[in-house]
Image: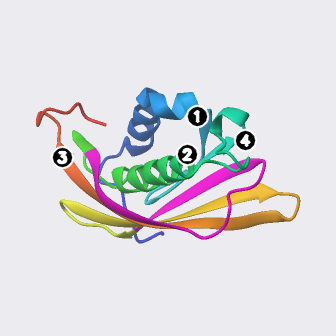
Amino acid sequence: MSALQPQDPDWEAKLRESFARQRIMTTLGTELTRVEPGLVEIACDFQEGLAQQHGFFHAGVTSTLMDSAGGYAAFSLFPAGSAVLTVEFKINLLAPAAGSRLVARGRVFRPGRTLTVCDIEGYVLGEAGEKICAKMQQTCMRVDAGAGLAAG
């Protein structure tokens, strides 16, 4: 990760401010647990309202956390005045997301001027420790502010 350098000296403050504006993250009760250039981790504790009918984290919750972790990993490298949009992702649900906490770790795989590809892994924490439950590949697009989007 040390080879990835942010283009904005205020990248971390910009990222945290954007995250705070993303209401779905508030609704899900998430928190940023790790923020580095090109790497972002987001986690949330299990709540009944986030479960599917068998009592696991719902796949929609899993994919939402993973999408945001990858998006913010990409965003951390963008220049000032940029916004980020996901243009594509593919998720593999590898195991039931049964645990007390869901963690999404997003890493930039290949940065680009317009398109950035990210790898994201989803984990659940339970009695047996950390267990992978999902894998995602995502493409994010850098959009200049003023293109109908606010920076962030």
Amino acid marked by disc 1: Leu
Mark 2 or 3: the one toward you: 2
Q: Is residue 150 above or below residue 10?
A: above
Q: Earlier in the sequence, mark 2 or mark 4?
A: 4
Q: Which mark is residue 143?
A: 3
Amino acid marked by disc 3: Val
SS for callout 4: loop
Instruction: Answer whether residue 91 is magenta in the image.
Output: yes
Q: Earlier in the sequence, mark 4 or mark 3?
A: 4
Residue under pointer 4: 46
Instruction: Answer whether residue 24 is magenta in the image.
Output: no
Snapshot quadrant of residue 53: top right
Q: Residue at x 57, y 55 (%)?
A: 104
* Quarter of the picture holding the C terminus: top left
Residue under pointer 1: 28
Q: Earlier in the sequence, mark 2 or mark 3?
A: 2
> Label 3: few (<14), some or many (≥20) within 10 Å?
many
Residue under pointer 2: 61
